[in-house]
Amino acid sequence: QVQLVESGGGLVEPGGSLRLSCAASGFTFSRYTMSWYRQAPGKERELLADITSGGSTYYADSVKGRFSISRDNAKNTVYLQMNTLNPEDTAVYYCSARNDAYGRNYWGQGTQVTVSS
């Protein structure tokens, strides 16, 4: 059974940091591109960052220089380090696993991040 379980969300003050984790199981993690998305109320889901099986990374302009994605294939876990958070970063954050060759795309249930004083 495929599972993606996000954790690490919560309430943080502007300027603060959070580290999100996404623990994967039920598939060959190392062969998948892992991504972080977010969705704020009334807005479309937005791709923030991804990391390929080979370790190449992509960042959306909105988070470049503030967020960092990494993966630990030994722990089947992908991380999103978020620094210098601002209220516009408030959203539900989701992780995703994708393998185009297999035609597979999996999603986690999301974790809430709220940036507020």
Image (spheres, rainbow, N blue to C red):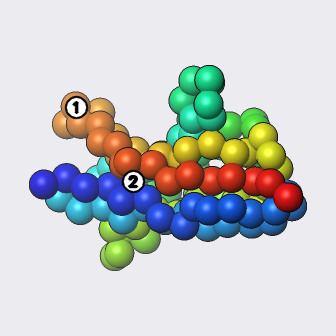
The mark that comes first in sequence, 1 or 2, is 2
Residue found at x 36% / y 59%: 5
Image quadrant where residue 116 sits: bottom right
Mark 1 or 2, closer to the camera: 1
Distance between mark 1 and mark 2 Cα atoms: 15 Å
Q: In the figure, 81 relative to 110: above or below? A: below
Q: Position of residue 41 (x, y in %)?
A: 62, 31
Q: Position of residue 23 (x, y in %)?
A: 36, 65
The residue under label 2 is which amino acid type?
Ser
Q: In the figure, 63 relative to 77: above or below? A: above
Res. 100 visible in picture: yes
Q: Secondary structure under badge 1? A: loop
Check residue 75 in the rendering and tell me which mark sits there, or answer none.
none
Q: Which residue is mark 2?
A: 53
- In the displayed structure, does residue 37 sit left or right of residue 117? left
Residue found at x 47% / y 64%: 7
Q: Position of residue 17 (x, y in %)?
A: 74, 66
Residue found at x 54% / y 67%: 8
Check residue 103 in the rendering and tell me which mark sits there, or answer none.
1
Image quadrant where residue 81 sits: bottom right
Q: Secondary structure under badge 2? A: loop
- Structural crowding at the residue carrying mark 1, measured as other residues with C-alpha within 10 Å and reported as few (<14), some (14–19) or many (≥20): few
- In the displayed structure, does residue 33 sit left or right of residue 115? left
- Structural crowding at the residue carrying mark 2, measured as other residues with C-alpha within 10 Å and reported as few (<14), some (14–19) or many (≥20): some
The residue under label 1 is which amino acid type?
Gly
Instruction: Give the quarter of the figure containing the C terminus.
Output: bottom right
Residues under numbered marks 1 and 2 in contact, where contact means CB atoms less than 8 Å apart: no
